[in-house]
Image: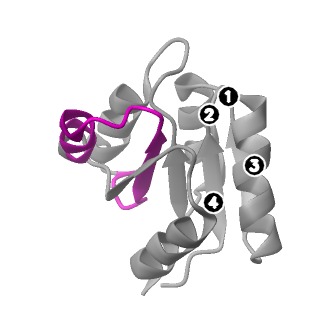
Amino acid sequence: MAIHKILIVDDSPTERYYLTDILVKNGFSVSTAENGEDALLKIRADRPELILMDVVMPGANGFQVTRSIARDPELSAVPVIICSSKNQETDRIWGMRQGAQDYLVKPVDPEQLLARIAALGA
């Protein structure tokens, strides 16, 4: 299933703009959320086909929100790619254990991001 609708979850306006710019220029429909709570509401309302999730945010962190998505039968089919400045291997492993399909370290490389999205949509 080709991916078109992507939700970006990040508390940084700069990061949301950066990722949105990459995705919109490549034909994706993008919505954004500033925190985990907002993300869960938008996921239920709008059903994105992919979620790009930051980790360090106020309130629920990206690991917690990813776990909530993975454990919810209504939402678990939506893939999550964690995009985080946390670049330790233990962070990547923990993110994958929470239910993420992939883990990218910021600053996210545009070509790498697009390749990962294409692989998920294949």
Disc 3 marks a residue whose amino acid type is Tyr
Instruction: Find residue 18 and name its label.
Output: 3
Foreground label between 1 and 3 = 3
Asked which secondary structure carries label 3, the reply is: helix
Residues packed near mark 2 inside 10 Å, few (<14), some (14 to 19) or many (20 plus): many
Locate residue 9, reporting x and y percent: 60, 38
Q: Are marks 2 and 1 in contact (CB under 8 Å)?
A: yes
Q: Which residue is mark 2?
A: 10
Specify whether residue 89 is painted magenta. yes
Q: Are marks 2 and 4 in contact (CB under 8 Å)?
A: no
Specify whether residue 6 is painted magenta. no
Locate residue 52, reporting x and y percent: 53, 50
Determine the image quadrant of residue 88: top left
Q: For the residues marked 2 and 1, what is the alpha-carbon distance in whole angstroms?
A: 5 Å
- How many labels were placed on the picture? 4
Q: Which comes sooner in the sequence, label 2 or label 1?
A: 2
Q: Which residue is mark 4?
A: 6
Q: Are marks 2 and 3 in contact (CB under 8 Å)?
A: no
Locate residue 64, reporting x and y percent: 34, 27
Q: For the residues marked 1 and 3, what is the alpha-carbon distance in whole angstroms?
A: 14 Å
Residues packed near mark 1 inside 10 Å, few (<14), some (14 to 19) or many (20 plus): some
Q: Are marks 3 and 4 in contact (CB under 8 Å)?
A: no
Disc 4 marks a residue whose amino acid type is Ile
Disc 2 marks a residue whose amino acid type is Asp
Locate residue 76, reporting x and y percent: 33, 53
Residue name at image x 36 percent, y 61 percent: 77
Q: Which residue is mark 1?
A: 34
Asked which secondary structure carries label 2, the reply is: loop
Q: Is residue 12 left or right of residue 35?
A: right
Residue name at image x 65 percent, y 26 percent: 11
Q: Is residue 121 left or right of residue 43?
A: left
